[in-house]
Image (tube, helix red, strand yellow):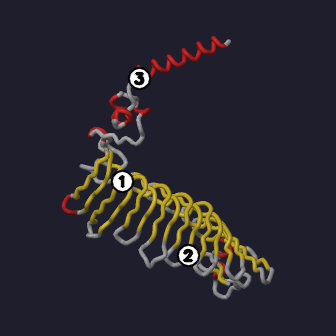
Amino acid sequence: VHTNQHTFLRIVCSTMAELAVASPRSPQSAGQDPHISSLAAGEPPMMQSLDEVLEIPESVQDLQFVSRDFLDGRGKFEAVHNAMLSRSLMSGSFECTTSVGSVMRYEGTFLNDPHTERPTPSGQGVRTNPDGSTYSGQWKDGLYDGHGEWKACPPSCESFLGEWKKGRKHGFAVQKFANGDTYEGDWANGKFQDRGKYVYANGDEFMGIWEKGLKLNGTFYFKDGRVSTRRWQNGSLVACQDFDPQKRLYQATITKAQVHDPAKGRYGTSALAGTMVSPRGVRID
C-alpha cells in the first residue's frame, strides 16, 4: 500500500513540473500588460477583460447628426439618425414657418430621408402650434394617432386627454371646454359617440348614449336634485319624464306629438299639465 501511494505522488509531481515547463510565462511575471497579452495570444472575445477599450471602426459608426435649413429660410431641421437605414426612426427637432408667418415647433421622433424630405412626425413627440396650443403624445404619418394630450394656450383651461386616430378624437377621452363644461366618454371621428357623461359648468350632469355628437337617450341629474329621463331623435327631444325628489312626484311624460300638436299651440288653449315647452321640445318649469 505504501509503495502505491509513493508512486502516485511521484507521478503527480512530475506531471505538474512538465506543465510548468511547457506553459509560457504569465504576463504579470514578464512585466507586460495583461490586456495586450490576451489580444496577442488570440483569446476569444468572451475571454478578454471587460475593462479593455476597443476601437470602433468607421464602418460601425452608423449614427450621424444632420442639421439643415429649409428652403426660403422657412425653418430649421436637426436630428440624429441611422445612416445605414434609409428610413430609420430619428430623434430631434424642427421649426417651420406657416404661410401667415407664424412658427410651429416639433420635438420628438419622426421618419423621413433627413437630406431631402421634410420631417414627418412619427412615434412620440411634442408640437407647439402657432396659436400657442400644444400636443404631447403619439404620432403616425404626421398626424395625432394613439394616446396624447392637447392643451389650449393659457389662460384658457380647454384641453383634451385621450385617444386619437388619424388626427381626430377617437376612443375614450376627457375633454375640458373653455366655458367650464367637461365631457368624459367615448368618441368617434371627432364627435361624441356611445357612452358619455357631460358635466355643465353650473353643476348639472347628463349621462347617456350619444350618436354622431348628438344626445340619443339618457338622464339629466340637476344640481337641485331633480332627475329627468329623456329621449331624442336626430337632435330633437321626443320624450321626457321628470322626477322631483323633494315632492316625490313623477310628472307626466311629454311626447313629441304633444309638443308639436297644432291644437295645443293655438291662442287661448291650456298648457300641458302646467308646463312650458320650447320650440325644440325642451320643457321649462
Q: Distance between the residues labelled 2 and 3?
A: 85 Å
Per the image, label 1 sits on a secondary structure element best described as strand
Asked which quadrant contains residue 42, the reply is top left
Image x and y of residue 7, in percent: 59, 12
* Front residue of 21 and 255: 21
Q: Residue at x 68, y 70 (%)?
A: 219
Name the front one of labels 1 and 2: 1
Asked which quadrant contains residue 92, the reply is bottom left
User: Label 1 amino acid?
Assistant: Ser
Residue 26 located left or right of residue 224: left
Please tell me the numbered disc located at residue 23.
Answer: 3
* Front residue of 240 and 17: 17
Q: In the current view of this chain or complex, which residue is farthest to the left? A: 72
User: Label 3 amino acid?
Assistant: Ser
Q: How crowded is mark 1: few (under 14 residues within 10 Å), some or many (20 or more)?
A: many
User: Label 2 amino acid?
Assistant: Asp
* Front residue of 15 and 70: 15
Q: Earlier in the sequence, mark 3 or mark 1?
A: 3
Q: Residue at x 26, y 60 (%)?
A: 76
Q: How far apart are marks 1 and 2 (CA)?
A: 37 Å
Q: Which residue is drawn at 58% across and 61% down?
A: 186
Q: Which of marks 2 and 3 is nearer the N terminus?
A: 3
Q: In the current view of this chain or complex, which residue is farthest to the bottom? A: 268
Please tell me the numbered disc located at residue 181.
Answer: 2
Q: Which of marks 1 and 2 is nearer the N terminus?
A: 1
Q: Does residue 48 sit above or below 83 in this rendering?
A: above
